Image: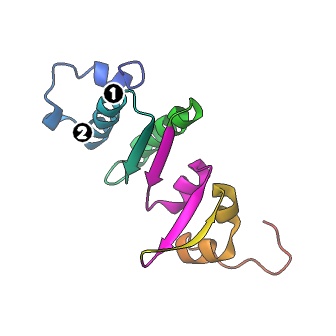
C-alpha cells in the first residue's frame, strides 16, 4: 500500500486522525485494498479534498480499475467521473434516467446542460 500511496510512507508514525483529508482518503482506500476485494465501492471520494489531491485519488481509482479491480464510483463531480467511467448511470430523484459509457454521457446534451453547465451546441455542431 505504501508503494501505491508513497505519501503515507512519510506518515507511518502519525495517528490516522491527524492526517490531512487527502491522506485519510488514501489510508481508507489502502485499508480496503489490503483485504484483496473483488469490488470496491467509492462514495464521493473527492468530497472536501483539494483539487490536486482529487486528481491523485481519482487517478488511483482509474489505475486500480485498469488493473482489473471492479470499482463502483458514486461521485457528484460529473465531468471528472464521466471521464473516468467505462459505464455510467444518471440518477434523478432516485430513478435511473440515463445510462451509457462515460464518453456517451459526456456527449449527451441533457447531461451537458443539466450537470456540466454547458450550453446546448448549435444543431450540427460536434465540438
Q: Is residue 125 above or below residue 36?
A: below
How far apart are the two marked residues, 2 and 1, measured between alpha carbons? Answer: 23 Å
* Percent x, y of residue 86: 62, 49
Residue 45 visible? The answer is no
The label on residue 35 is 1
Which residues are drawn in magenta? Answer: 70-93
Picture quadrant where residue 29 is located:
top left
Q: Is 58 on the left or on the right of 21, as rendered?
A: right
**Helix, strand or loop at mark 1:** loop
Q: Indicate yes or no whether the magenta region holds residue 79.
A: yes
The label on residue 55 is none
Residue at image position (48%, 39%) is 61
Q: Indicate yes or no whether the magenta region holds residue 83.
A: yes
Between 91 and 110, the residue placed more toward the observer is 91
* Percent x, y of residue 46: 38, 50
Residue at image position (62%, 71%) is 112
Between 45 and 48, the residue placed more toward the observer is 45
* Percent x, y of residue 19: 20, 35
Residue at image position (82%, 67%) is 126
Q: Is residue 24 above or below residue 87?
A: above
Q: Is 26 on the left or on the right of 64, as rendered?
A: left
Mark 2 or mark 1: name the one nearer the start of the chain: 2
Render colour scheme: rainbow
Residue at image position (31%, 40%) is 25
Picture quadrant where residue 56 is located:
top left
Q: What is the residue that sits farthest to the right in this orientation?
A: 124
Name the residue beneath numbered marker 2.
Answer: 20
Amino acid at each position: 500500500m505504501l508503494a501505491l500511496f508513497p505519501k503515507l510512507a512519510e506518515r507511518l508514525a502519525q495517528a490516522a486522525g491527524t492526517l490531512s483529508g487527502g491522506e485519510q482518503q488514501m489510508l481508507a482506500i489502502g485499508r480496503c485494498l489490503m483485504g484483496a476485494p473483488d469490488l470496491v465501492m467509492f462514495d464521493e471520494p473527492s468530497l472536501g479534498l483539494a483539487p490536486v489531491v482529487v486528481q491523485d485519488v481519482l487517478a488511483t481509482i482509474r489505475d486500480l480499475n485498469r488493473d482489473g479491480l471492479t470499482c463502483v464510483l458514486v461521485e457528484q463531480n460529473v465531468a471528472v467521473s464521466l471521464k473516468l467511467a467505462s459505464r455510467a448511470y444518471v440518477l434523478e430523484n432516485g430513478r435511473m434516467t440515463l445510462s451509457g459509457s462515460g464518453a456517451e454521457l459526456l456527449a449527451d446534451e441533457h447531461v451537458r446542460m443539466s450537470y456540466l453547465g454547458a450550453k446546448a451546441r448549435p444543431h450540427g455542431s460536434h465540438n
